[in-house]
Image: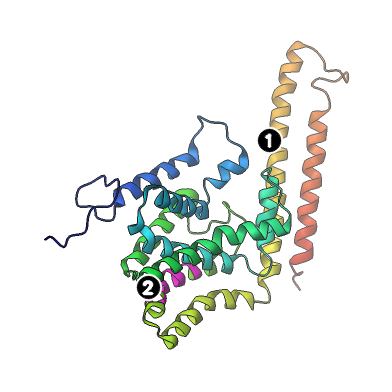
Amino acid sequence: MSSRKPPPPFQLVTGDRYNLTLGCIFAFVFASLKDQKLIDLHPFVKWSMNAYTNWNLAFIALRVLLRQSQWDPFLLTNSIGILLGFRTAFCQGLDDNMRKKIKKLGFPLPRKVFVMADHLCHTMPPIALLAALVHRRQRVPAMNSVYAFILSTWFSFRQSAQLDASDLYVPHPWKRAWLGIVTGALTTPSLVDALIDGKRRKLLLCIGALIAPWLMAKLDPNLRRTYNFENRLKEANEASAAAERRRGESKVRRGGNQSGGKGSTGAPGGGGGARDCSDLRRVQSEAAVVVDRHVPATP
């Protein structure tokens, strides 16, 4: 009798015992959605399809739908990295800037609902996957940490052309976030081994390693002030750019109106340009106030 394991369901390439080909095709499809223009999607939906947490949730949904249980070690490694990266990057209440960004995308959430959704997307997947693997006494090969690094870095460069994903999300301590991601991915195999073998000392060491990046960020006295300031400055710059776009559109409309006659106000093109200039000055003034409040004067 052969001791070889049966191939996974929906195996696309003979010999691909982990069905990596299916995963690569799925990742390619998600990556291509970044620039799709065939369907006019809601801004929040479009943004959500370009968020790494939702990529991970989509992979988990595909695993359940197509019974790809061989992906569980990788999904756990990736999920713990995401959890630790998010908690480290958005500690000290910085996650509320993310909630405000989602509100601007047309999907307002009360703080309590946002926190519940946060735990549903970031906390529950690693807990469920960890419980399943420990129950089956299935260990996590260290190679899964490498796979998690490959996917997460490829995602970051695909979406933002850099490791700093502040433009995709909101300003955050991205180096600390990556420290959390790397620590989580590297510690996951040892964490599963410690739980399966019942080694309490090893388990405590793993837990200590996992919370270290979050704890260092949590105790940073300047982190909250620094990144709240950067977020407000980014919002002011975005509003300024939007005002510039409106000015350009107003000039185009004014040119069209001039060819056909004066506007209803008696002046060519009406008063849209003046309003846009006023909006731009207001935004620039707000940005200057923010800078004055947070940047100390030079002696």
**Residue 244 percent across, percent down from the top left:** 70, 38
Q: What residue type is labelled 2?
A: Pro
Q: Which amino acid does label 1 sit on?
A: Arg
Of callouts 1 and 2, which one flags the residue occurring earlier in the amino acid sequence? 2
Is the residue 167 above or below the residue 229 in the image?
A: above
* Side of 167 relative to 100 (left or right): left
**Residue 222 percent across, percent down from the top left:** 68, 73
Residue segment shown in magenta:
180-191
User: Real-space Cα distance between discs 1 and 2?
Assistant: 50 Å
Q: Regarding mark 2 in the picture, which secondary structure is present there?
A: helix
**Residue 203 percent across, percent down from the top left:** 44, 82
* Residue denoted by label 1: 245
Q: Quick one: quadrant of the C terminus?
A: bottom right
**Residue 58 percent across, percent down from the top left:** 47, 49
Please tell me which residue is depicted at 37% across the width and 48% down the height of the picture: 66
Please tell me which residue is depicted at 71% across the width and 44% down the height of the picture: 240
Label 1: how many Cα within 10 Å (few below 14, some 14–19, many 20+): few
Q: Nearer the viewer, residue 235 or 177?
A: 177
Q: Which of 100 and 282 is in front in this view?
A: 100
Q: Regarding mark 1 in the picture, which secondary structure is present there?
A: helix
Q: Which of 225 and 17 is in front in this view?
A: 17
Q: Quadrant of residue 263?
A: top right
Taken as a whole, is the magenta stretch helix, strand or loop? Answer: helix
Residue 189: which disc?
Answer: 2
Is the residue 62 above or below the residue 178 in the image?
A: above
Is the residue 269 above or below the residue 189 in the image?
A: above
Q: In which quarter of the image is residue 86?
A: bottom right
